[in-house]
Amino acid sequence: MRGISSFGMFLFCLALYAQDIDVYIDTRDGEVYKTVQIGEQLWMADNLKFSSEDSRAIYSKSTMLSEVFGKLYCWEMALEVCPDGWHLPSDEEWLTLADHLGGEDVAGGKMKEISKYWNSLDEESNNESGFSALPGGFLEDPKDTSYPYMGEMGFFWSSKEKSRSEAWFRYVKYDGNLLKAGNGDKVFGMSVRCLKD
C-alpha cells in the first residue's frame, strides 16, 4: 500500500510540473526533440543538436558526445541557432522557469534527468519538470577536447549580455538542487535549450 501511495504521489508531481510532453521536428535537418510544457512556457526537453556551417559555430561539429549531450555553441551563435518559432531564453525566462518549480534553490533538482551520464546524483534529484537536463560540461576553446565538468554540470546559455566579452548562463550541478546563474566568456561553448516564442 505504501508503494502505491508513493507512486501516486510521483504521478501527481509529474502532472503538476509537466502537463504536456510532445515532440518537435526541426525542418532544417529532421532532428526530433522532445518538448515539455512547464507552467506557461514550452521548452525543448533536449539540448539542441543543429550543425551550422557558420564560422562562428565553432562548437557545433558532430561528435559521439553530441549525440548524447547535444552540441555546444558560442554565445553569438546561440542567439541565432534556434529554429523559427523558438528562441534562446532570456535570464528572466530562466527565472520564470525556476519560480514555477519552487525557486532557484530547488529548481535544479527538478530539472536533472536521472541517467547514467551523471557521475553521481543527489537523492533529491527527480526530473519532476520533465526538462531532462544533462551534464554536457562546456568548452573554453574550440581546440579543447577535455570538456570541463562533463558528467558533473550542465551549462545553458541565456540571451542576457553582461559585457562586450561576457554573457549570462544558467547551470545545474550533480550535487545540488540549484538552478544557478553565472557569466562567462562569449567564446565558451555551452548547451542551448530553445524556448517557444
Image: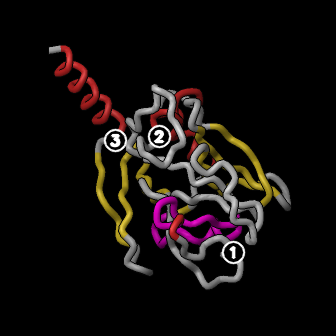
From the viewer's perspective, is 138 left or right of 110? right
Residues at marks 1 and 2 touching, judged by CB atoms closer than 8 Å: no
**Mark number displayed over residue 111:** 2
Residue 28 drawn in magenta: no
Residue, disc 1: 58
Residue furthest to the bottom: 53
Q: Is residue 57 left or right of 124 when viewed as pictured?
A: right
Q: Which residues are magenta?
A: 66-86
Task: Kindly state the secondary structure of the residue where label 2 is placed.
Answer: loop
Q: Residue placed at 53% from the left, 64% from the top?
A: 65
Which of discs 3 and 2 lies nearer the camera? The answer is 2
* Amino acid bearing label 1: Ile
Crowdedness near tag 3: few (<14), some (14–19) or many (≥20) residues, C-alpha within 10 Å:
some
SS class of the residue under badge 1? loop
Magenta-colored stretch includes residue 67: yes
Badge 1 crowding class, 10 Å Cα cut-off, few under 14, some 14 to 19, many 20 or more, is: many
User: For the N terminus, which image quadrant?
Assistant: top left
N-terminal of the pair, mark 3 or mark 2, is 3
In this rendering, is residue 44 above or below 125?
A: below
Give the number of the disc on residue 43. Answer: none
Q: In this view, which residue lies farthest toward the right?
A: 164
Above or below, 186 against 183 in this view is below
Sequence-first tag of 3 and 1: 3
Q: Which residue is mark 3?
A: 18
| Helix, strand or loop status at disc 3 | loop
